[in-house]
Amino acid sequence: TLNNTTTALLPSRGKVIVVSLSAQNDNLECSQLHRILYLLATYFTVIVVLMMDNVDKLDKIVRKEDPEVTAAKNKLYSSSVLTPSILPEHRMVAVRSHTGKIALVRQLGSTVDFVLDYESETKVELERFGFRVIVYNSAAKNTTLARLSNQLKINE
């Protein structure tokens, strides 16, 4: 169940939301994250933006068949909760830079009602273009996921 504060922030059922996740930390295998994405994906059209490692990469283009992209997607599908039928692979996009993430969201344009991101600079950039953005702290895994799961009433 959603509480009154959460429902005031969330768009109506079926709307497009963008969730940005870092592919460099352990959150992708977290069961709470899988449940959160499951709930969001069953209520909204969720686009997951995976921020890939940008260090020592000559090729700035991320291809869906890159091993690191496949590994990140497999981590998200590692539990029985989140499956490709709930969050299809074509709704997961990988980027290597902050600029790429901003450009992707801007290309989606007015179809996006809500952006959930872990970088405060993303909020500043996207709000300039009229997007609603909520920043969560990816580094504080347990606190952040607990706060988000409490809002969505998810129990471990």
Image (cartoon, rainbow, N blue to C red):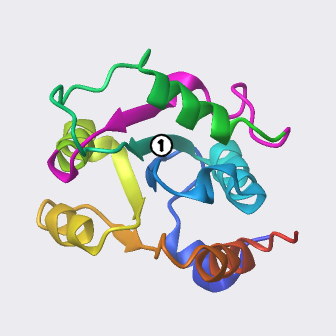
On screen, 141 above or below 19? Answer: below
| Spot occupied by residue 27 in the image (x, y as percentages of width and height) | 60, 58
Which residue extends farthest top?
A: 65
Q: Amino acid at mark 1?
A: Val
Label 1 residue SS: strand
Q: Which residue is mark 1?
A: 48
On screen, 40 above or below 93? Answer: below
- The residue at the point 21 percent across, 34 percent down is 57
| Spot occupied by residue 42 in the image (x, y as percentages of width and height) | 70, 44
Crowding at dot 1, Cα within 10 Å, few <14 / some 14-19 / many 20+, comes out as many
On screen, 116 above or below 21? Answer: below
- 30 vs 47, left or right, is right
The magenta segment: 80-99
Which residue extends farthest front?
A: 56
- 29 vs 59, left or right, is right
On screen, 77 above or below 10? Answer: above
- The residue at the point 74 percent across, 32 percent down is 83
- The residue at the point 52 percent across, 57 percent down is 25
